[in-house]
Amino acid sequence: MILIFGGTTEGRLAVEVCEQAGKPYYYSTKGESQQVEMEAGIRLTGAMTAEDIASFCRSKEIRCIIDAAHPFAENLHQAIAEAGLPVIRLGRNLGRHMEGVEYCHDYADAVERLRRESPRRLLALTGVNSIARLKEYWLEHPTIFRILNRAESLAVADDAGFPRAYLIYYREDGELPSMEEEKELMQHLGCDALLTKQSGGQGGFEAKVSAALQLDMKVFVIEAPRLPDTWQVVTGRHGLRRAIEHLIPDFFPLRTGLTTGACATAATKAAVLSLLRRGVPSEVDLSLPDGEIISVPVSVEGEGVASVVKDFSDDHDVTRGCRITSHVAYSPADRHGVTFLQGRGVGRVTLPGLGIPVGEPAINPTPREMITREVRALTSADVDVVLSVEGGEELAERTFNSRVGVVGGISIIGTSGIVCPFSNEAFVESIGRELEVARAMGLSEVGLVSGKRGEEALLAEEPSLRVIHYGNFVGEALCKASQLGFRRVVLGVMIGKAVKLAEGHLDTHSHKVLMNRSFLTQLATEAGVADGAERIARITMARELYGCMPEAFFSRIRELCLAHCRTVFPSGKLEFRLICDNPA
């Protein structure tokens, strides 16, 4: 069993991740104000002491605690530490120190620095619970606090003896002020100093600090309390799930993993660090495309050389367990920027249509962007990056690389950095659970997409739409949506899956069905393309159809996809979106 301490945005995220398992867990908050939808979770409310936590964990056989509480909930952090169990800290990415800001170790240090600087009027954006801790300062110096306009918050301020005349309030709709709104407020109040906490993006930290700096105010920031070194710290859903999988291997039905692109990025970062002689790391942090920071074990094998063993997920991926090596060296004078070169076991592109120039190593655009970002964070020097994959030539024979013009090895791929196991019954069950949660939340409309790019496309059109990934199981997802009574489904399908769906395949995995050229030729003929067979013969990837087929062809694709989807979603409004994935 898992015990989550929440009450924050991070707490909601922890619930979302644990719900994927479909197994019981506990979610604890001090108060009852946070609304959280759970199917498998058990809600607990009320403050818990260290003894309470230890006793509860023994009685309920808790194996892991997830601390997703506020960064400054120091008493709770201490109580959790005393329980003596493995702890995953789901925290916020607090960012780096900002120039022009004076950082304080704690409240006492902040008071000392404020007294020394002696500002005319202080704006304290440190929360209602900090009023009592800063009393020795505001009793002697003009100070304004901003708090939530709630009875419990006002009671805390009253108990501390703080005059209500010097309180201001957050907006009633809960929206955090923009930087311009913060500037306007600070000018109106006539404050010349700001005190806030290192709360990360969730607390609007950057907006208020940037506003104050632009007004030439003195800015003091109280650093987040230090946590025990034994805690595993993660900052997002992927890191949290990976940490749970490590501590409780049987909690989730399937295990996630890293893409070859994420492994290559981690290996390259370690190689650059060794090239720059900045140590020999055993693990490195890297930024995923969605901004989450994760840690990856690495092995430095020499100056400018490092490798990562691709971890095992439950996806049927031929690269599981292979070693990906990055060799980084300074470029010769005729090469500039970050140059990618082909190493042994990595394929070479021989045909157009993959979004990579012909002749280049088969390293997809997203991994290239990830690697370049990590390199540039460390050095501005021109460098060559040579990626190689142990046994890559043999592994490539078990893929469809040769059919799309990639020869000599595998491709370095991945759009999210994370491998989610799509190809079995447990993933279908997880789709069902996500739909059940959405329905339990009162939603009657839902978006269904295969992955990250589809989700981005639907949300660009309809930001409030709840979007769920179906992987390859579009038929199963639609069937479940129909059973649950969803009144409207927006189905986003990329062309590679759409050409299979149009032929009637409701499971679009490449292990089960390939692009049927005869079928596409038939559709081209129906669309009035006289040389359809010749055009189809020239393509290697479905997305190349965008460059050689008229709109009538794609209209027929949409029509057929909708017809087949209606067999499993017979009632309700079904909208089909053919998502273009920006072919080269």
Image: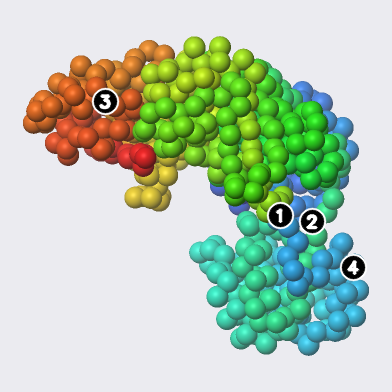
> How far apart are the two marked residues, 1 and 3, measured between alpha carbons?
51 Å
Nearest the viewer among 561 and 443 is 561
Task: Estimate the spatial distance between the alpha carbons at disc 3 and disc 2, rounded to whole Å.
Answer: 59 Å
Q: Which residue is mark 2?
A: 224
Q: Which mark is first along the chain, 1 or 2?
A: 1
Q: Classify residue 326 by image quadrant.
A: top right
Left/right placement of residue 338 relative to residue 279 reads left
Give how far apart the Cα atoms at labels 2 and 1 are.
Answer: 9 Å
Q: How far is the residue under mark 2 from the one under mark 4? A: 13 Å
Q: Do residues under tags 3 and 2 come within 8 Å of each other at their CB atoms?
A: no
Residue 382 location (% of width, % of height): 65, 49
Residue situated in front as seen by the camera: 311 or 114: 311
* Cβ atoms at labels 3 and 4 below 8 Å apart: no
From the viewer's perspective, is residue 212 above or below residue 431? below
Residue topped by disc 4:
109
Q: Residue at x 78, y 87 (%)?
A: 120
Q: Secondary structure at mark 4?
A: helix
The figure's colour scheme reads rainbow
- Residue 12 shown left or right of residue 441 in the figure: right
Instruction: Give the residue at x 30% y 33%.
Output: 544
Q: Earlier in the sequence, mark 1 or mark 4?
A: 1
User: Disc 1 residue type?
Assistant: Leu
Q: Residue at x 58, y 18 (%)?
A: 392
Please, what is the three-letter code of the amino acid marked with disc 4?
Answer: Asp
Residue 91 appearing in the image:
yes
Callout 2: SS: loop
Q: Decide: marks 2, 1 in contact (CB < 8 A)?
A: yes
Q: State which quarter of the image contains the N terminus.
A: top right
